[in-house]
Image (cartoon, rainbow, N blue to C red):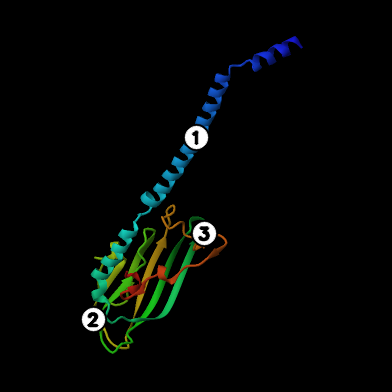
Amino acid sequence: STNGISLSNRFLSYPVADLHCLSVLRSLVEIFIFKFTEYSQSQQVYYNTSVLNEFQTEKEEIQESVDFEKTLKKYDREPQPKITDVSLNVDLYPADRGFRATGIYKLQNRTDKPIKTICVQMYPSDDLHLTKLTFSKPGKLDTTYAERFGFRRYALAQPLQPGDSLQLDFAENRTPRGFSAGGASSSIVPNGTFIDQQLFPTLGYDDSYEL
């Protein structure tokens, strides 16, 4: 029709400069969207690794290991009881990648010396929390190094003699928050679970945390 030809002519005669401006504008919008998405993702990574979790540089991690050894190595040669029996109850929460656990250790002095102090090491992690630690024999719990190194000392009122035993009771929970610089934990997921024994209390000085 005449109107159709007229419209077509007007389109064909549209200024080239205006078409170029539209193309440039589209490119700028695409760049803005890309940059905004990139910024949002970087902010999300920062929030998870540095706000919800503690971020450490490689240099800081090395220094942490050095400080661990300098501070706690003096307890390396203290005699410790052996874990002779374990009772463990664990509730899993795969959707949250977390768990709650209670446990009982039976400890026995299998050395030829009296044991005056029991050292308990917890895996140092922002999302792992020891909520209970008690012993069946009286004593005093020292938590001086608990917050930084996950290390506690229990001084018995009466030394544990060779062959004697006592009971350790504990409770803990793991509640991951977002993901750390090492990535999200995959030890507890809906289609399978693997919990390393390192996540539960161990006895004595642990040289695996050294540099």
Name the residue: 47% across, 41% down: 38
Q: Is residue 207 left or right of residue 198?
A: left
Residue bearing the label numbered 2:
158
Nearest the eye: 17 or 2 = 17
Name the residue: 29% across, 88% down: 162
Q: Residues within 10 Å of mark 2 (few under 14, many from 20)?
A: few
Instruction: Name the amino acid, label 1.
Output: Ile
Q: Is residue 183 above or below residue 141?
A: above
Nearest the eye: 60 or 200 = 60
Q: In the rendered image, which quarter is residue 179 located in?
A: bottom left
- Sequence-first tag of 1 and 2: 1
Q: In the rendered image, which quarter is residue 147 located in?
A: bottom left
Badge 1 marks a residue whose secondary structure is helix
Residue bearing the label numbered 3:
94
Residue bearing the label numbered 1:
31
Q: Is residue 87 above or below residue 127?
A: below
Q: Is residue 56 above or below residue 197?
A: above
Q: Is residue 132 left or right of residue 12?
A: left
Q: Residues within 10 Å of mark 3 (few under 14, many from 20)?
A: some
Nearest the eye: 67 or 77 = 67
Q: Residues within 10 Å of mark 1 (few under 14, many from 20)?
A: few
Q: Position of residue 69 (x, y in %)?
A: 27, 70
Badge 3 marks a residue whose secondary structure is helix
Instruction: Name the amino acid, label 3.
Output: Pro
Badge 2 marks a residue whose secondary structure is strand
Q: In the rendered image, which quarter is residue 64 located in?
A: bottom left
- Residue reaching furthest to the front: 16
- For marks 3 and 1, give the one nearer the viewer: 1
